Amino acid sequence: MRHFGHVPPEVREGLFHRQPVEFSADSPARTLAVALGATLYSPATRPRLADDVLKQAARGVVSMVLCLEDSIDDADVAAAEENLMRQFAELDRRGRDLPLLFIRVREPGQIPDLAARLGPAARHLSGFVLPKFTEERGVPFLEALAAAESASGQRLYAMPVLESPELLHLESRVDALGGIKRTVDKYRDRVLALRLGVTDFCSAYGLRRAPDMTAYDVQIVASVIADVVNTLGRADGTGFTVTGPVWEYFRVQERMFKPQLRRSPFTGRAEHLRTALIEHDMDGLLREIELDRANGLQGKTCIHPSHVTPVHALSVVSHEEFTDAADILKPERLGGGVVRSAYTNKMNEVKPHRAWAERTLLRAEVFGVAREDVSFVELLAAGLK
């Protein structure tokens, strides 16, 4: 797999100062956690799920979750499990260059059961998504994952979803976060990333953000995100990759506020792209992706294929970011100090900015570095073709 691998090589050559590297399901967990990018969810009931997976992989999707939980009716779970068996067998027969595939389960017992029933096709499974994760619920899930991994002989990752009311409510949040931290620390080698269930957070208060608002405009949600990153997303070696919340909208809605996309990056022929993004409420998504990264989140949960390219385009490291990060991490700067950036527009303070620089270079490896004259607009346009 390679981000922007679906873009013709000659086009990639014109976009990237350093192209994204190839990776596979066997790559180090640190790489895979960043490489998840836009993780596309799909109900496990879809009758042509194998076709969907192959089609989305050809369009640049590198991680997918096949959902047996909230996206399907309670009465359809058994049929959805049977469908997964058929679809994985079909992928095993046809599959090449498959994305990272995860199954979102409801109960711990499903994990070893599904892994065993998949048989040889389980080699295409990268792990499981664990819903409504708390210390009490999480331990049985992770023990079941360990048992399935031992029985199958292959590496299986967990992606816990943080979405429980205990995490949202102020009086229980500190204890809930502490319990989650104890649990994921114990099973650190198996936890690939932590996912945020913002829809469930909003549900607890009867809220739903509009398409021209981000998760960060809903203050009660923003406060939970901040506390999750504070406890679980630290850059001191104790933290985990925390992914951005789902963006719910993909159809035209009546707008109350002005579009959030400035015209200047879309000059000339790209103006039609700006219009299309606004018409499909993508300007809110683009703003939320930027706020995700500013708040310590990487990647994003996606429910529609049209959301994938914006996430990936805005994950590419700019030439300016790369230059700053590489300068900060030069061996001769180990002692610290302050240097003027090569772009002469900011101060790079070596010790405080080191963690940022390390994260930036890891993202640069996975998503590439744009050429100096290439913006996210060109990356977005190339990815959408």
Image (spheres, grey):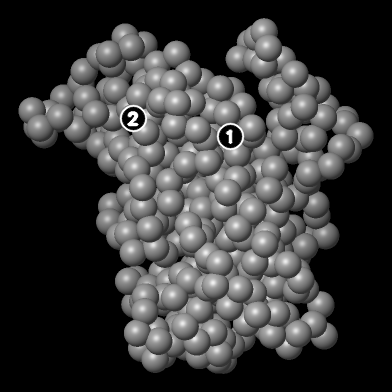
Q: Position of residue 57 (x, y in %)?
A: 57, 53
Q: Which dot marks residue 244?
A: none
Residue 348 vs residue 16, the one in the foreground: 16
Q: Judging from the image, what secondary structure is the residue with disc 2 in?
A: strand
Q: Please determine whether, in this image, residue 180 is positioned above or below residue 306.
A: below
Q: Are marks 1 and 2 in contact (CB under 8 Å)?
A: no
Which residue corresponds to mark 1?
383
**Left or right: residue 181 compared with residue 105:** left
What crowding class fits label 2: few (fewer than 14 Cα within 10 Å), some (14-19), or many (20 or more)? some
Q: Residue at x 53, y 41 (%)?
A: 6
Q: Residue at x 29, y 24 (%)?
A: 324
Crowding at label 1, few (<14), some or many (≥20) Cα neighbours within 10 Å?
many
Residue under label 2 = 18
Q: Amino acid at mark 2?
A: Arg
Seen as rendered, the residue at the extreme right is: 254
In 3D space, how far apart are the residues under numbered discs 1 and 2 (Cα atoms)?
Answer: 17 Å
Residue 371, quarter of picture: top left
Left or right placement of residue 139 versus residue 349 in this view: right
Image location (x, y in percent) of residue 206: 83, 60
